[in-house]
Image: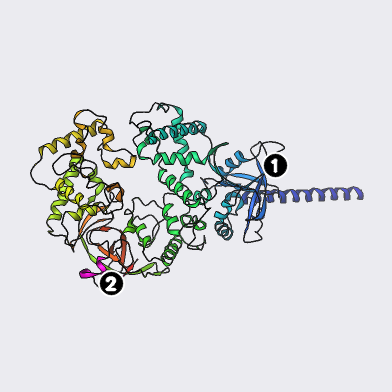
Amino acid sequence: MAVTEQLIRFGVWILISLLRLYIRTIIKLFVRHILGGKRCAYSTLKFPNSIRVLSLESGHGDKLYGRLIEVPVDAPVPYEALSYVWGDSTRTHLIHLRNGYSLPITSSLYHALRNLRPTGDLELPRLLWADGVCINQDDMDERAQQVRMMSTIYSRAYRVITYIGEDTCDVDLAVDLMKKIARYADKVISGQCEVSISHPEELPDHNDMSWGSLKDFLSRPWYTRKWILQESVVNRNSVMMCGRKYIDWCDFLQMDAIFGQPKLGGLLCLNDILPVSRPAMDDMAIMRYELLEKDGPKRMTLLSALGLTRHFNATDPKDCVFAVASLVSDIELDIDYNKSERQVFIEAAAKILEGDSNGDLCMLSAVGVKGKLDLPSWVPDWSISPGRALIADFTRFKCGGNTKARPEVSVQDGTLTILGVGKGRIIHLTDLIINWMKNPREGYKWIQEQFKHVSRLGAYTTETVYMEAPRRTMTSDLGVQSGDASIAPNSHIHGFEVRVRPLTPDTEREKRLERVEQANASLGHDSIDRGNADFGYTPEDIFGKLPGAFRGDAWGDAVVCGFRMGTEDGVGGGFMPLEGLPESGNIHRKLCTTSEGFIGMVEPESQIGDIVACLEGAYVPHILRPTGDGSWSLIGDCYVHGLMDGEAFRGKGKVPSEKFTLV
């Protein structure tokens, strides 16, 4: 009996012990599932130059298996670095590590790894580096330390794989179409055939599935992701991947070049697939060229890198600065994710000004568009697209003369104090230039109105002919050859005045305007103007296809609103006094007059009462607005005729510099 009781007690004890062990195991697994094993899956990196490499094992099912290996970043390990879009940052999938833990990963990374993993039973594991697995994303210090090495990680990789997402519409069709377009483009550029607004016979019909496939391929969110720059522009051995299919980077770069080819701009089938990400694609192609020249990878300045990446997006605004940190050579950024967005942007701006060895205040031309971030007016918001072009080739000007900027920055207060000279308040302001470009008749009336306004001023402040200033101002004094930085010749000024001077009514001109408007309507456009240079074709290309009055030089006299005007005697094909207006960067600016008699092209946000300031060391003038407490807000840069070559700092116009504190 005693033995039986002992056995029963022993059995109960065993059952209770097993139950306790079971409960502890369940709790442990539950906690591990909730936390993703993050506390144990990542061991602290032993050295500052260490990285983790994922050894991804072969497989076929839904589960991913691998192990993390710590190696020095400069070790001869043949890993491939993955560039991809995080997408939804929610980590809904798992990768199971051989140390017994699992890591949660995003859906986009999960699908990328599934397509990248080996599938053969005897295949060796694939060595990969992907930030979503190889960096402990929850350790801010490690994350910052690894971000500093990103450029090195990608440049030292055996190969960079750009994964743009799943193959949702047969990417092979897109690649094949890109090659056909490239062959057709070669013929057009070499002169073997002429581009037409009708659909070329060399390309598939509009309804062909390949066009939809190509549009899908070029519309992936990967192209606008901020981090792709340091991931995809520092390693020559790069390949694009869609699903499980590989695409040569050269095909993508060639397609981007075709979009920018003026001779192909009138090809409607290309305009139909032109992606909204085109500016970002173009900037990425530029950066690949700049960073991967034949003499080997090199770096750029922080200001250049931030300026080129404004068309790209980042989930965390701080990454707009941090994502380019390892690409720059002139400034070392303090990457700290514990800092506020405001502090990160102010510190970056301060470092740019402190490292501005030329003292030219170029950075201030990057302000003018305000986003959601609470930033001082003088600090550019690199998280949003600029929305407008800079004044074309502004470094050819020297508004500050021989002076040199002496900026004083208070990071804590968010203020910038600089010296300069005020040159009058804005007393007259027009609508945006682009608004009158849309219709020839309205454009003609608009220019005449400005002519009347300026002519009342008499001799211009700089003692030049009053008609010279508006023409040079509206085009930032660009030469005639489509954005040539040479100063425009005087003959263009004479032609401009003749064409817009409101003398006697010109019935013939009115008839030509009507014909232009009728042609616009027949083609389904509000207007056809030289602004079409953005798409690569000129009005002559269109009117050459139409009958009667629209042939030959009729265009030269008809479009008196701006870009291609006729000669003094009314015969077309002569002067082009406003040629270069789109290239000047001024079509999204306003024309203004100041209290001191100057006229200029200013930011859209400018208001009556703002002042024109010539800052020491600056290439161009700037618009400032008083805040009421003795400080100023920076509105943006501007072109002001008569103040672009240091006139404010020499001769009769010279006055003592004053301090401007920008907030």
Q: Is residue 9 left or right of residue 611?
A: right
Q: Are marks 2 and 1 in contact (CB under 8 Å)?
A: no
User: What residue do we see at 46% from left, 30% from top?
Assistant: 210
In this rendering, position of residue 525 left or right of residue 163: left
Q: Position of residue 403 (x, y in %)?
A: 32, 69
> Start and end of the magenta stretch?
645-659
Q: Residue at x 35, y 33 (%)?
A: 268
Does 651 appear in magenta?
yes
Let me know if residue 389 appears in the view.
yes
For residue 29, side relative to residue 405 (left or right): right
Bin the neighbour count of mark 2 within 10 Å (Cα to Cα): few under 14, some 14-19, many 20 and up: some
Please tell me which of labels 2 and 1 falls first in the chain.
1
Q: What type is the residue that disc 2 sits on?
A: Ser
User: Which residue appears farthest toward the left when viewing the image?
Assistant: 504
The residue labelled by disc 1 is: 124
What's the distance in space between the residues labelled 2 and 1, CA to CA?
71 Å
554 to 347, vertically: above or below:
above
Residue at x 49%, y 56% (from the top left corner): 299
User: Residue 292: x and y, percent?
Assistant: 51, 50
Q: Is residue 163 magenta?
A: no
Q: Give the image location of residue 468, x and y in percent.
A: 18, 54
Q: Amino acid at mark 1?
A: Leu
The x and y percentages for residue 112 are 58, 41
Q: Identify the element where label 1 is drawn.
A: loop
Per the image, label 2 sits on a secondary structure element best described as: loop
Q: Which residue is mark 2?
A: 657
Residue 276 lies, with reference to residue 203, above or below; the image says below
Mark 1 Cα shell of 10 Å, populated few (<14), some (14-19), many (≥20): some
